[in-house]
Amino acid sequence: MASYSQLLLSRGVEGFITVDTSVKEAPSIPTVAVAGHHPVAGVTNIVLDHKKAAQLALNLLKGLGHDEIAFLRGQPFSSDSATRWSAICEVAEELGIRIRPELTVQIEGTDSSPSIGYPFGKELLAQRKPFTALFAYNDISAIGSIWAFREAGLRVPEDISVVGFDDIPGAAFANPGLSTVRQPLIRMGQIAAQTVVDQIEGRGEYVPEIPIEPDFVERASTGPAPGNVKEKSGEIHISV
């Protein structure tokens, strides 16, 4: 980051917007960080409310009767990974959801396609510990995990519900459509751009943090936990 900063400063840039990059030193020009959560003097962080995101996802799964939930943790180099995981752990404790080490897998690698989730979906299955839902670090790992589950003969969501994070454009077109926490990336980018321009032009005062609320998009990849659907007198009753 430092070498790139010096290069850009030498070319006369007046402000920085960083994405998923940890800024470690106070900048000499206005700087806004998107998906960077280490407080640094002079840097405005566009901060997603990760606790709210965890509440949206885990409340849905709990409401659908899922007690055994698996998790894919984000890569250590991602600036959101530790913050998001901490929020998930906090909300899970509040809701009485167990986080089992054998059902928690660390994603590794830098692949930006769904194939990054495939081997870790297989790793979860190889543990031979029952689970009825997966909350993945992001959408691409969730979609890759679905490939692994279906390859093993499991149905989504009938056997395993899957929740992603981000709501990338491809999430709606996954098979099945992916339920996911929507991170409003376009709005975050717009706020970042407006904030840095206002600071450059002296129209806005420096603020250390701008919080952003997530939404949840429920699609076909989530459903009642197996055993929570009962048929009586021709009607379907869902017990939650």
Image (spheres, helix red, strand yellow):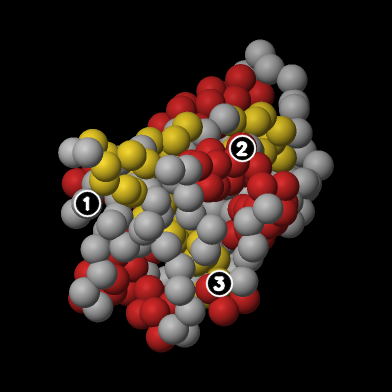
Image coordinates of residue 101 in percent, x first then y, are 62, 76
Q: Are marks 1 and 2 in contact (CB under 8 Å)?
A: no
Which is nearer the N-term, disc 1 or disc 2? 2
Q: Position of residue 142 (x, y in %)?
A: 37, 60
* Three-letter amino acid code of the residue under disc 1: Pro
**Distance between mark 1 and mark 2 Cα atoms:** 25 Å
- Describe the element under mark 3 as helix, strand or loop: strand
What's under tag 3, amino acid-wise?
Thr
Three-letter amino acid code at disc 2?
A: Lys
Of residues 75 and 131, the one nearer the viewer is 131
| Residue drawn at 65 percent across, 42 percent down | 51
User: Which numbered tag is attached to residue 104?
Assistant: 3
In the picture of the structure, the residue carrying the numbered disc 2 is 52
Contact, CB < 8 Å: mark 1 with mark 3? no
**Residue 165 in view of the camera:** no
Q: Give 228 or 55, whichever is nearer the viewer.
A: 228
Q: Is residue 217 left or right of residue 183?
A: left
User: Residue 61, relative to residue 146: is it above or below?
Assistant: above
Judge from the rendering whether residue 52 lies leftward or rightward of residue 166; answer left or right: right
Residue underneath mark 1:
176
Residue drawn at (59%, 41%) of the image: 55
Q: Residue at x 63, y 65 (%)?
A: 99
